[in-house]
Amino acid sequence: MTSLKTGWQRYWQWLVGVLVVLLALGGFAYNRTRAHADTGRTKVVFWHEMKGPGQKALDSYVKEFNRKQSKYEVVAEFEGGYNDVIQKILNTHGTAASPALFQSMDISTSQMYHSGFTTPMQKFVDRDHYDLDQIIPGAKAIDMRQGQLLAMTFNASQTALYYNKAVLRKYGITPPPVDPTYSDITRVAKEIHSKSHGQVKGMTMEAYSWLFEQLVANAGVPLTNHDNGHTGNATKADFTSPAAIKAMEWVKENIDAGDFMNFGSGGNASANESASFLSGHLGIFMQSSALTGQLYKTLKNDLGVTYYPRPDGTKANGIAVGGAALWIANDKPAAVQDGAWEFTKFLVNAQNQADWQAKTGYLAVNKQSKDEPQLKALFKKSPVLAVSGDQLARTKPNNTNSGVFVDGWVPARTAIQNAMQQIFAGEDIKKSLTTAENTYNKVLESNNRANGRN
């Protein structure tokens, strides 16, 4: 009897829970509809992942867009980190809870494309004769498929190399060139360590797959077959190419010389290397260009920035943008999708992209932004803030510097990160990268089988 009673209690608890969720979704949908009815505008819900300065800037753009016109009302909603938003998009598509416009990270491009949940932005580009040439080629390349724009790159960043000019000046060391080779950086790192008698470490590199990926990209080598998935479905990863081995041999040379400081991986590693760099205990490190503004606030003109390093004896192939792009969901009425497109155009116009870079450190994706008074004044005062943007502008897109068009790249990054940690700890380079390659190939094979793409 007690068991039966308990079963009924659990059933009613479950039923009440379901009703609460349904009522919440219904209320959510009602509130959205009611807001549209009250304002007479078409409501456009925008999901994003920006916090801090990025969120503050986005809120100001939403307010300005809504003030400048009366047809659409954009509502921006913070939905957590990149992975969180992807899952929410996949789980809510086709319901009243889904957004019209959303931000999704660079390595989710293939996943969003194959989901069938989005309307390619090329549709609106063609319809409105939008001048897509105003968007920097290297910025939009990661969001293209067979010449068609799938999404609009928005918060773009690149990997950059930073050095502390004050440290180099103190020890009489010649800075690296703007377009450095591995040997250029090794020279500076070894001199820092030697001339400081070990008081300052020469360089570091976080065990972070994105940094490894861009070293390989800058050498002009793909990480998977079929040109990183751009010319066909990727079925095999290649983390053991000569370019990948050479990149890790470069790092290991510095480890063996004693000038390398290993901070490990993750958020703490990034924070600790930045702190060490700013305090003058570390001469060189590599991270996102989005950090440039923050580092400049402390070091001012003592901050040095170069393009990402390239192998000796080769020309820089260029690197892919990181960050995220804006996507339009196809489960919303045409009028709502039109509003999402209008807001997208507003966000990437020259003036707003100049303001975006000045306020957040992300790179302006509009070619004309560099001529806006705000950025011209900023770059004149602080030329170092223009270096990563120049690196992006000079990149000629190809299949090896336009990111990976592969579903489920997160496990690849985990495998590569583990390999990097092993290498930094003294393990064999080829063996560590082979393990990572084999690990991910199993994941890739499973994903392709599940999606009928073998």
Image: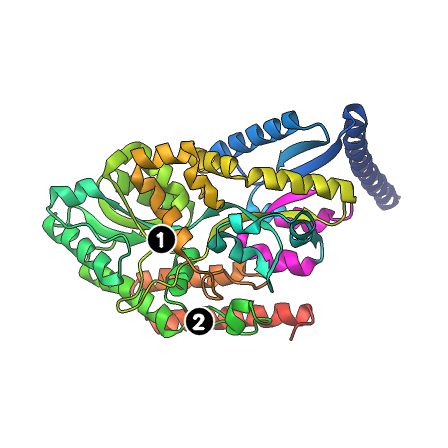
Amino acid on which disc 1 is placed? Glu
Q: Which residue is mark 2?
A: 435
Span shown in magenta: 86-115
The residue under the point 49% across, 66% down is 399
Residue 376 percent coordinates (x, y): 37, 35
Local packing at callout 2 (Cα closer than 10 Å; few below 14, some 14-19, many 20+) is some
Q: Which residue is mark 1?
A: 206
Q: Which mark is residue 106?
A: none
The residue under the point 26% across, 62% down is 182
The answer to whether one can see residue 97 in this image is no
Q: Secondary structure at mark 2?
A: helix
In this picture, is 73 found above or below 361?
Answer: above
Residue 6 percent coordinates (x, y): 83, 42
Question: Is 240 on the left-hand or right-hand side of 113?
Answer: left
Pointer 1 and pointer 2: residues touching (CB < 8 Å)? no
Question: Is 37 on the left-hand or right-hand side of 428?
Answer: right
Residue 53 percent coordinates (x, y): 47, 32
* Sooner in the amino-acid sequence: mark 1 or mark 2: 1
- Which quarter of the picture shows residue 290? top left
In this picture, is 291 found above or below 105?
Answer: above
Residue 149 percent coordinates (x, y): 61, 55
Q: Nearer the viewer, residue 379 or 189?
A: 379
The residue under the point 47% across, 42% down is 368
